[in-house]
Image: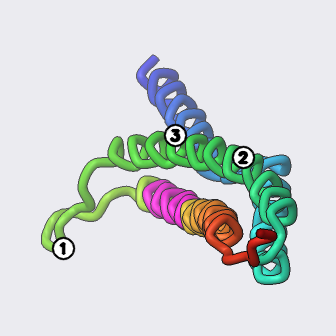
Amino acid sequence: MPRLALVLALLFGWIVAFAVLDGVRADVLSPEEAQKLETARGLVARIDKQQEEQKGSFNGLLELRDQIEPVRQDLGEIIGVLQQRLDAAQAQLAEFGPVPAADAPPEAEQQTADRQAAQAQVADIGNHLHGARALMVRADQLWDELTNARRDLFSSRILEHRGSFL
């Protein structure tokens, strides 16, 4: 009977360990999210280049600004999802507790491996989140620059001195 309890306890431990590792090894970004990020990177780079070309055109600047708006929305959604995943991964890592001190007895090899996998997952999600936030900042800057360029163009055309027909 004690052997059966020991076998069941070991089996339960392995099931829990694999469940934790399954969650830790899950991809950080879904293929759809990765595609949205790549599209956003390309669009931000393209708009950054075209901004100077469209400097004298109200419609060109407006079109560029309209193109960047959905990117900003997609990035906001992806950042929200990544933040939730990071919070969950950090909570999962916190369940392991502190790393044993150097003079303390070492933890089990499986727990050390699980902790390292969870730390790698937190770092990976954090890196993706940092990149998405940086892209969001650049998209916001472009949106502001395009808006300001339209405003400046409007002001310069209103205040432009024209000859009187009198």
Q: Main secondary structure of the magenta part?
A: helix
Q: Can you tell which of label 1 and label 3 is closer to the viewer?
A: 3
**Residue 98 as seen in the image, left or right of residue 155:** left
Is 9 located above or below residue 69 in the figure? above
Of callouts 1 and 2, which one flags the residue occurring earlier in the amino acid sequence? 2
Q: Image point 38% across, 56% down: which residue?
A: 108
**Residue 29 as seen in the image, left or right of residue 1:** right
Is 138 located above or below residue 97 in the figure? below
Q: Amino acid at mark 1?
A: Ala
Which circle marks residue 80 in the picture? none
Kindly state the secondary structure of the residue where label 2 is placed. helix
Q: Which residues are magenta?
A: 114-130
Q: Position of residue 81 (x, y in %)?
A: 60, 41
Res 135 visible: no
Q: What is the quadrant of the C terminus in the image?
A: bottom right
Q: Nearer the viewer, residue 63 or 117?
A: 63
Label 2: which residue? 74
Which circle marks residue 102 in the picture? 1
Kindly state the secondary structure of the residue where label 3 is placed. helix
Give the residue at the far front of this rendering: 166
Of callouts 1 and 3, which one flags the residue occurring earlier in the amino acid sequence? 3
Label 3: which residue? 84
